[in-house]
Amino acid sequence: MIKFYHEMKKPYLALLNNNIHLTIRWLGGFTDGYASFSIFKYKPRLKFENHLKELELFNRIKDFLNISNNLSITKPRLDRSNSNATVSLDITDIHILKKSIVPLYSKDGILKTKKFKDFNDWSFVLDIYYFGYHLLPPPPCAAAGGRGGKLLITEIKNSWNNFRLSTHRMSRQTIKRIYLLILILRISLKLYFHYLLLMKLKTVLDLGEVLII
């Protein structure tokens, strides 16, 4: 037991000497245990957090992801005797999340726990935010139920926070109904994006006809 305790106290980086590069699958496992896909004020974020002794490891994760985000260090809480200093990496840049993070974690088998389901819903919210749907009025279709983008984000966030907890007591019919609504909204959102793209294309074509005339 004493030997096991001391092994647990060693930095995670002990498994990765300077001659071994981080891999996508290693990062997936680390994300399962020490990262969270979340939403803050309707904006998606990915946050890694661990003991301060993993500072060097977090710098290597930054290099692996090719990002320049500053690491945050939190001091131990004075009101808790077992509190430790922590280091965190908070990724909130919407373009980095869309262009780098989503393709990385979308690969088969990278995430293996409940985190994979969180990632799928989080990716949908990211699309809503990335394409600016959170700022638009409800799309002109009954499936949206008259809800704007921000209300849609809130509904998705609440669904994954509640329905995956073992203590949740909402009826199965209610759960199925809301998830069906989310599925319909996913399809409606894609159709709405295509509609906007076609309108933009039509405007360009109309402008081209005017210039030719």
Image: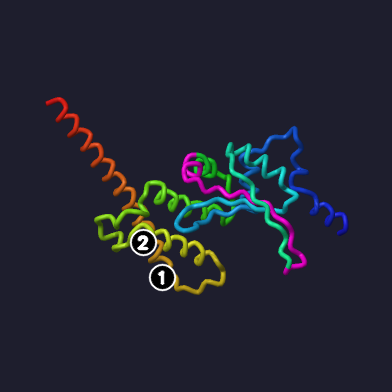
Q: Which corner quadrant of the image does residue 15 belong to?
A: top right
- Give neighbour class at mark 1: few <14, some 14-19, many 20+ (Cα, 10 Å): few
Q: Which residue: 47% across, 42% down? A: 95
Q: Dividing the image into 4 quarters, which one contains the C terminus? A: top left
Residue positioned 50% across, 58% down in the render: 40
Q: Which residues are magenta?
A: 79-99
Q: Amino acid at mark 1?
A: Thr
Left or right placement of residue 4 versus residue 18 in this view? right
Packing grade of label 2 (10 A; few <14, some 14-19, many >=20) is some
Q: Position of residue 138 (x, y in %)?
A: 29, 57
| Label 1: which secondary element | helix
Residue indicated by mark 1: 174
Q: Residue furthest left?
A: 213
Residue tagged 2 = 181
The way the protein has been coloured in the rendering is rainbow
Place of residue 85 in the rendered image (x, y in percent of width and height, measured from the top left): 72, 56
